[in-house]
Amino acid sequence: MKNLDKNIDGKSYANKLLKKIFPLSQEYFYKFNRKPSLAVILIGEDPASNVYVKNKIRTAEANNIKSIEIKLPTETSEKELLQKIISLNEEVEIDGILVQLPLPNHISEQNVINTINPDKDVDGFHPVNFGKLYMGVPNFVPCTPLGCLYMLKNELKHLSGKNAVIVGRSNIVGKPMASLLLSSDCTVTLTHSKTKYLKEHCKKADILIAAVGCPEMIDDTYVNENAIVIDVGINRVADPLQNKKSMLVGDINYKKVYNIVKKITPVPGGVGPMTIACLMHNTIKAAYKNKKYNFIDILEDST
Ligand code: NAD
């Protein structure tokens, strides 16, 4: 029977990936007599960041990964934060370091990213990792675009020659996504807030990725019937039915776009769970790297 469900189920993809990660972390424990480890630094009281960190730590613990949560007050100076990172870089039993963004205004995000040892940079934001990705020799790849690529490879099998349009050019999503798709032989258009004729670009996409941060900005007038749509956006808006105080929506107007396109990721339940699964993947990779042990990248094999 023809499958009429157009949803790309991010939760199920994430579970599939975590099932491959679990035995690797167990094997690591037997080999090296300790769990792979992830240090997560959270500065301040931002409620969304708190939830993201909690989810990351919960998933790590459930997958045999030791998590070290470091909570620092908003007033922490940049110098203090950089010193903390330097000491984590030096700790041999710490494999991965993650600093939850955004940071308070008085701390430079770039200085923080630059200070993390590139071989512990499980977020893949360090300039060395960013450069390696663009050169086609990736080390650590940012988790969100990595998760999007994993789902696309599974949905489409062959990406070669596809027209991929990305809306949003941030360093954490848009740009690395463009690089990954380019390395997969797509023809990539990277659009942004100054792009003219955005709709026309989007309409030509076989693969459309939205990472803008504007609730439901992309509607049915931006897509064609063959498009595979990946919605990275996470926006909290007032619930129109007022069943709840607020609800999460993406950058895609899901209700309007669903009826037209071939496949689409929902929000929530699409990209979000894959981002966390890819963080676990990067942590295991960092742990094996720390022991100078050959790690066969499980994301290379998308089956
Ligand atoms: P960002 O603010 O750093 O970048 C937004 C980009 O969108 C910019 O490049 C800007 O040029 C572009 N843009 C803004 N308005 C536009 C417009 N009208 N037309 C075209 N382009 C426009 O955001 P980000 O960090 O890349 O995040 C984007 C969204 O993805 C946010 O909603 C964020 O919460 C979400 N996000 C989700 C995950 C996840 O795990 N699902 C991870 C990271 C980010």
Image (spheres, rainbow, N blue to C red):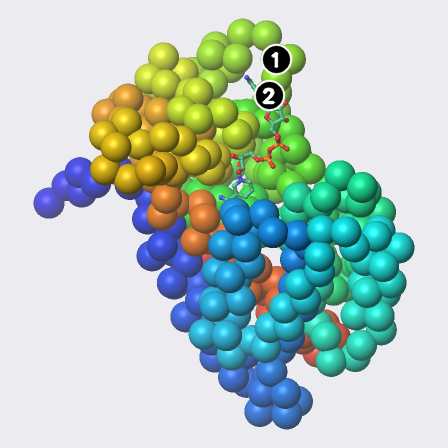
**Position of 92 compared to 190: left or right?**
right
Whole-percent x, y for residue 23 in the image: 47, 79
Instruction: State which image quarter holds ligand 1.
Output: top right
- Name the residue rendered at 51%, 79% in the picture: 64
Tell me the number on the disc at residue 191: 2
Whole-percent x, y for residue 44 in the image: 66, 52
Which is more toward the observer, 208 or 250?
250
Residue 157, quarter of picture: top left
Residue 187, quarter of picture: top right
- Name the residue rendered at 55%, 58% in the picture: 53
Q: In this view, does 221 lie above or below 22?
A: above
> Is the residue marked 1 within 8 Å of ligand 1, measured from its CB?
yes
Marks 2 & 1, CB-CB < 8 Å contact: yes
Badge 1 marks a residue whose secondary structure is loop
Q: Is residue 2 above or below residue 203?
A: below
The three-letter amino acid code for the residue at tag 1 is Thr
Few, some or many C-alpha atoms within 10 Å of disc 2 (few <14, some 14-19, many ≥20)? many
The three-letter amino acid code for the residue at tag 2 is Thr
Q: Is residue 239 above or below residue 297?
A: above
Tell me the number on the disc at residue 222: none
The mark total stands at 2
Tell me the number on the disc at residue 195: 1
